Amino acid sequence: MTTSKSSTARRALGFGIIGATGIAVNQLAFWLAVVVGSRFVADPEAGGASDAAQYNMMLTVAAIAATQVSTVWNFVLADRLVYRHRPPGTSRRVAFAKSWAVNNAFNLVLRVPILLALVWLGLNHLWANLVAITVIFVARFYISERWIWHTRTVVADFTDEAATRPTKAEVLVEMNDDPLGPHMAINLKPRRRTKLRRYSIHGLCTILSEVKLPELAEFEVDRLPCKHADITVRRGYVGYRRMSTRVRATMGPGLFVYREHLGSLGANFRVDLDNRTSVTVSPLLARSHHVVYTNVVEALLRFVLVNKGFMLLHSATLQLGNETIMLSAQTDTGKTGTILRLMREHPTIAGFLSDDMTIINGNGVAYSFPKPLTISSHTLRAVDNSVLSVGRRAALALQSRIHSKDGRTFALFLARLNIPIIAINALTQILVPPPKYQIRTLVPTAAYRPSGQVSRIFIIGRGPALTAPLSHDEARRTLMANTEDAYGFPPFSTMEQAISLRRGRRSKRRGIDKLRQREVEILEKFLTHVGTVTHIQSPNFGWADVIAGTVVGTGRPAIGATVLEPAVDALAEGRRTEPHVAGVGQMADTTPARPPDGLPA
């Protein structure tokens, strides 16, 4: 279990008390050795230089002999009282050998020189021995914690619930009997200023993270609604320190470890999956918040939601007039620009749910997932340029070049080569952050909607002008293909093979095949509650005009249309933002269907 400050303090106190008794034992053994040695060595004050040299040698031998006695004493007490709960794989004989080596090394390097120097300065030999022992106490405790008893090598989360190590039978690839082998994860002590981030995604899934996840900023809360988080993310070293000639993946039921060429200093991570999921990311990876979320957390979140009966669908969703509509397209088609146009051109009747991912259930309900929008110089044409400062617009030119479709295509090409692609991606994101902005930064009048009953789905694409209906079977295949397109970057294709989850401690594991089957079933049930699915092609990015004309009958808002509350963030307040009507009486009921029991709408 990863140690907290309080548990470390308790061990330090226990170590100190045992050390105090050890000092008494050492002093007694040292005194007896000096008494015995004094019978054979003359007092240096009564003799010459040769007597002084013999006396110093006698003190050195006495100190070493006393150390052997106190080492055994301290180890037996510490092993039985302070470190009785040793991590698996920590042998008592190995621990004693390390303790003996450390104590003797410290005596030769530190204690004996300090002892002789203090005696030479005129201090009594017993007091000099006491001072020397006290000086080396802190260093000995630190080494005992980290090297002898390995108090920080067991993977755990913040909830004081130790993670279960995989059994030998569960391990499939590259696992050996060494507890500090290539699959290990050593959690780092949280920094003093580290803030634990808590995210509750509509109460459906909770995340506790040592790494900031800006994509989930709208879901950040002060306290989680449950005792244990579904996903825990923390910093730590993963794998061997030595470098490798290729990418290595350790896989087993409920375990995935990804290691690149740079050893533990690279962009490595480990995932332990059960009814709860624990993720350990390397320090380099932890500095790139976007890569941690996109390449690791979101892929896990997808199947955690599926395991609970929901699906994370690659789509954009908004309320337009009295309807909740959904847009789907392959990555970099123009979905974000279409959403921005609809939100800007119809401020009084448009409500924002999501731009990139939407949570759906089998009842046709879509739940908001308001990640920051990734924009480009081209996308910015859909909004007022003044919403961004001159500096941000200047930086956007470089950001758009690197984080464009061409940039991602080049990254996918590099991913096929034998290079540390995740580390390169992380460094790139650190040096040139992606141009991501919340919807209200780009469209200040935007209003959030927490959920809605989807009535229409638009599949948009580029090509000759075309508007045609799609069957639900064609829609299912297209929506699944567009969702898979969003997870094309490594190491998803490898990591998903290791994904297996439980609904509870006693339930059977669901492997990736069953989870994917469940995902398709959720989507099929969802589509049965959707009115129409339309395929729209446009040669000039004109999807917003077609959609607005189809849904509200005009490209401009009508008099007496629905007005949402742009100043109130319904997600932050955890309530519905019910629409009200300006001018022409009460509108039809747009309250979305209720989610399963216990879940907020």
Image (cartoon, grey):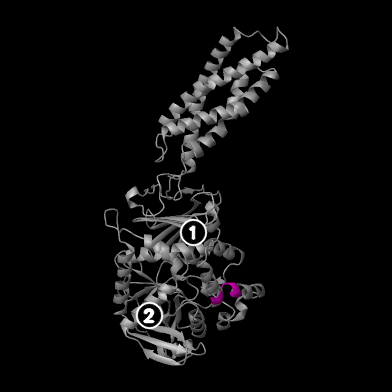
In the figure, is residue 531 to the left or right of 405? left
Image coordinates of residue 561 in percent, x first then y, are: 43, 86
State the residue at coordinates (57%, 81%): 378
Can you name the residue that lies furthest to the right here?
A: 48
Q: Which residue is mark 2?
A: 478
Is residue 405 on the magenta stretch? Answer: yes
Give whichever of 493, 558 is nearer the camera: 493
Image coordinates of residue 253 in percent, x first then y, are: 34, 56
Image quadrant where residue 255 sits = bottom left
Amino acid, disc 2? Thr
Under circle 1, the secondary element is loop
Q: Which contiguous range is marked in magenta?
A: 400-406
Q: Which residue is mark 1?
A: 247
- Give the quadrant of the N terminus: top left
Task: Find out whether the residues at labels 1 and 2 contact each other: C-beta distance under 8 Å.
Answer: no
- Give the quadrant of the C terminus: bottom left
Dominant SS type (magenta): helix
Residue 83, placed above or below residue 309: above
- Counting residues from the start of the chain, the first of labels 1 and 2 encountered is 1
In the figure, is residue 91 to the left or right of 525? right
Image coordinates of residue 357 in percent, x first then y, are: 43, 72
Q: Is residue 243 visible?
A: yes
Image coordinates of residue 367 in percent, x first then y, are: 39, 72
Give whichever of 485, 210 is nearer the camera: 485
Image quadrant where residue 172 sits = bottom left
Which circle, 1 or 2, is nearer the viewer? 1
Amino acid, disc 1? Val
Q: Few, some or many C-alpha atoms within 10 Å of disc 2 (few <14, some 14-19, many ≥20)?
A: some
Give whichever of 169, 318 is nearer the camera: 169
